Image (cartoon, helix red, strand yellow):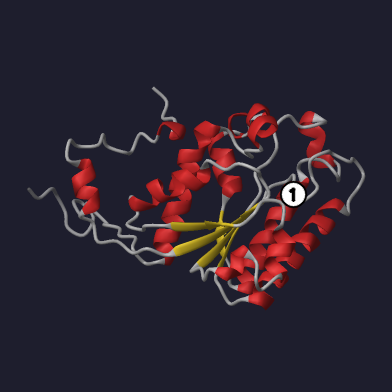
Amino acid sequence: MAFDSLELGWLIPESADFCERLRALQIDAPRCGEMLHQLASPRVDALPIAAVRHRVAVDINLAPSDQEFQQAIDPKSELHRTPSDAILLILDHRWLGLTTPSPGSGDRVSSALNRFTELLDALQSAAATPIIVQTIGLAPYPLFGTFDRRFEGTARGVDTLNRGIAGLAKDCGLFLLDVATLCETVGAVRFYDPVAWNLYKLPMASRVVPLYADWLGGLIGAIRETARKCLVLDLDNTVWGGVIG
């Protein structure tokens, strides 16, 4: 049977005393400000739950939707009114103006990256809060199929955009959540859900939200240095000859 990452198969079933053990945890509690252009976001509810697995208790301060620049510029906005340990930018190809393919138009990606940079400049000029940015998942159903890579202005322009976002993250000291890789992992057709977008302005399918929240929780855990890894090595026939034990 093939492994499906959307099923979160690596999680063990909760024990009977799960709630009591959860309350007893001594975990860090950073405050995260979220800026998103969607009207509804179940990810807001999923993130604190997923973050606990990475020993982080996230307290979310949700900024009003579709007011990214207003929130970034105004020092009295809801985003800046409550101090945050990090600001998460939840933006997708729709906010960047890449919804409709425009074959032959090579400046769309530059315009999108410029808009993204302007928002980052506004945020960084208003506060020194660490910022988490996301790469952009590739939209499904290419206009020209396998020929999309041969033309500018198609959905494949997201590849160039993501390289620009990764470059900005490196140059500006931002944290990067690679949503593009997440989209590739589950498949673009399953990652996006037009019904969820039209009804709730949810930029991804609801079944993807738990996995997205787990990836984001892992990143926040790494930022807060709560992540732990154990390296197990089999030294038989490597450091020594033969098998021991």
Mark 1: give few (<14), some (14-19) or many (20+) Cα within 10 Å: some
In this view, the residue in front, 241 or 207, is 207
Quarter of the image where the N terminus is located: top left
Please tell me in which quadrant of the rendered image residue 112 appears: bottom right
Q: Is residue 237 left or right of residue 38?
A: left
Please report the residue visible at 61 percent of the width from the left and 46 percent of the height from the top.
180
Spot the residue most to the right.
104
Q: Position of residue 156 (x, y in %)?
A: 76, 43
Amino acid type indicated by mark 1: Trp
Please tell me in which quadrant of the rendered image residue 54 appears: bottom left
Please report the residue visible at 44 percent of the width from the left and 58 percent of the height from the top.
59
Q: Is residue 189 left or right of residue 210?
A: right
Spot the residue most to the left.
245
Please tell me in which quadrant of the rendered image residue 116 appears: bottom right
Secondary structure type for disc 1: loop
Q: Is residue 92 above or below residue 185?
A: below
Q: Position of residue 117 (x, y in %)?
A: 74, 66
Q: Position of residue 7 (x, y in %)?
A: 41, 31
Please report the residue visible at 39 percent of the width from the left and 36 percent of the height from the top.
8
Q: Is residue 113 left or right of residue 195?
A: right
In this view, the residue in front, 138 or 119, is 119
Q: Position of residue 155 (x, y in %)?
A: 77, 40
Please report the residue visible at 7 percent of the width from the left and 48 percent of the height from the top.
245
Pointer 1 residue: 95
Spot the residue most to the top.
1
How many labels, in total?
1
Q: Is residue 179 above or below residue 114?
A: above
